[in-house]
Amino acid sequence: MQNDVNRRHLLRGAGGIGGSLAASALFPGWARSATPGLSTLPTLSGEDIKLTVGHSALKVDGRAGHAVTVNGTVPAPLIRLKEGQTVRLSVTNTLDEDTSIHWHGLLVPFAMDGVPGVSFPGIPPGQTFVYEFPIRQSGTYWYHSHSGLQEQEGHYGPIVIDPAGPDPVAYDREHVVVLSDYSFLHPHQIFRKLKQQGGIFNYQKQTIAGLLAGKDQTLQERMEWGKMLMDPTDISDVTGAVYRFLINGHGPSDNWTALFTPGERVRLRFINAAAQTIFNVRIPGLKLTVVASDGQHVRPVEVDEFQIGNAETYDVIVQPMDDRAFTIVSEAVDRSGMGRATLAPRPGMAAPVPPLRARPLGTMKDMGMDMSTHAGHGGGAAAMPGMDHAAMGHATAAPGMAPPRARGSDAMGDMGGMEMSMRDPLNAPQVKLGPGVQSIAPMPVDRTGEAGQGLQSVGHRVLVYKDLVSLEPNPDTRAPSRAMEIRLTGNMERFTWGFDGRKFSEKPAPYTLRTGERVRVILVNDTMMTHPIHLHGHFFELVHGPVGHMPRKHTVNVLPGGKVTFDVTGEAGDWAFHCHMLYHMHAGMFQVFAVRPLDGAAA
């Protein structure tokens, strides 16, 4: 199968389907779903840590499947470190393909960052690579493969770094909660299907029965969306149709359980290690006090629910007073399934599991056409009837490009007397138009004050990015010297993704910074899908909140048709920059930030 990402330069060692399946017959034994039933994760600590990557078999809700494991567990062992120490991690590869480990969110020398073809060559079969670096921070982080699609198969694990001084968060007990998605279908087969047919795993399309029952869109709205060949139900690429949603390696029926004593302040360290799933997290009956985001302390904020993008982490405090069980719910953003675990005073207890909520629908705002700022127009699908579909030809298509399908068209309309195009190159002159650019958002807006898709009307408080304020002062409060706009682009039908209309396999020039330079980056999402964007080797400050206390993150969700602005200070090296939806990165949504010294010498 042809992979759109250049494996030789980026994802070395992505084994083919046949080779991986053949190797699966040689499993050394069953992988442990990191914690059988309940208890804490297997933990490694100290200055010298040994990790072995290999094939294992795994049972999820009683069904057997294949996994790529670290030390035989899914998730991999919890690595517990101390701020100020130096750690040596010896990683031995027993696979028949290259592997790697990226220390997600850790500030490490770029040669230790673990991205094959960017910061090091990768770890060949039968060899050991030693990562060594000082620990410059504290908080909740994680680690995972950056080779092929191994992350989807179980190659991920949590990291907790204890602070050198007093912890500003008071708690009596803690649990690490790793959220992930798992499929019995091989990830290369999933990727092939995504390339063959857009929306192939979406089993929640609108139906005639739903129309007659008055559910979802009205007939007029469906007709308007149909004219643009768009599907408002297409929220996730890979869904519960082929996924099991795991908590600490356990499926919903396995009921992983975390213990507490009534009255205790319990710290839950949530990590989204999923390949392709954004989760909405809540614990019915308990308030969640968010105290850290991406390992960085924030001023406490009490919510009922939060959305966690791929690769994000959130620390929350809960204080259950009753002697009863509570259900930890990690519901997939498209509501096609959920992960489920239990918080309980004793083993063997369970609480009611809430039903899946109605799946969300895409809106005009998700297309980057926010009508709410224009008189006489709402921000949702109801604005569609005002569009002049007679003008919806494909005149703006790039030469040789077939008419676009599904998400994004050359839709033009007369909206309150204002003509708009969904592929107007004047809206993004840096974008390379072609088959990989299905649409350009004509009216993107800052959506960091909004809950994620489907959470706008849930009836309780949902965390939004603008709730986050850094507890500690920002280390760099200089104003940025320049701004850089980066467009998130894609074509859903072709399953092609990129930045500024370019896939990484096309070898676009890297984004360049100078060491110590302060730059403002504006991410604009031209697609109808949320993208969690991660910059290696850096924390950036989201531009909102009190000056000097802007929230610091390493990964940020950019909502459909939305934009996110952050300030970042360059650290010398070549740093991966990509969407953390694994299949989006695999299909080309990957770039490099090349940060060089001011004198132009090599870093």
Image (cartoon, rainbow, N blue to C red):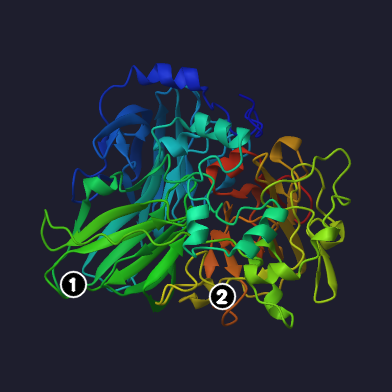
Which residue position is annotated with label 1? 264
Find the distance from the CA under tag 1 to the CA under tag 2.
Answer: 32 Å
Q: 22 or 251, which is in the foreground?
A: 251
Q: Earlier in the sequence, mark 1 or mark 2?
A: 1
Per the rendering, the mark at residue 172 is none
Horizontal arrangement in the rendering, residue 412 relative to residue 517 (left or right): right
Q: Residue 289, percent across and down? A: 35, 74
Q: 332 or 78, which is in the foreground?
A: 332
Hey, what amino acid is under mark 2?
Gly
Horizontal arrangement in the rendering, residue 31 relative to residue 481 (left or right): left
* Badge 1 density bin: few <14, some 14–19, many ≥20, Cα 10 Å: some
* Residue drawn at the location 39% of the way across and 78% of the way down: 300
Secondary structure, mark 2, is: loop
Q: Answer with the quarter of the image where residue 477 lies.
A: bottom right
* Badge 2 density bin: few <14, some 14–19, many ≥20, Cα 10 Å: few
Q: Residue 178, percent across and down? A: 35, 51
* Residue drawn at the location 82% of the way across and 48% of the way down: 432
Horizontal arrangement in the rendering, residue 416 relative to residue 339 (left or right): right
Secondary structure, mark 1, is: loop
Q: Residue 566, percent across and down? A: 64, 67
- Above-or-below relation of 326 to 18: below
Which residue position is annotated with label 2? 449
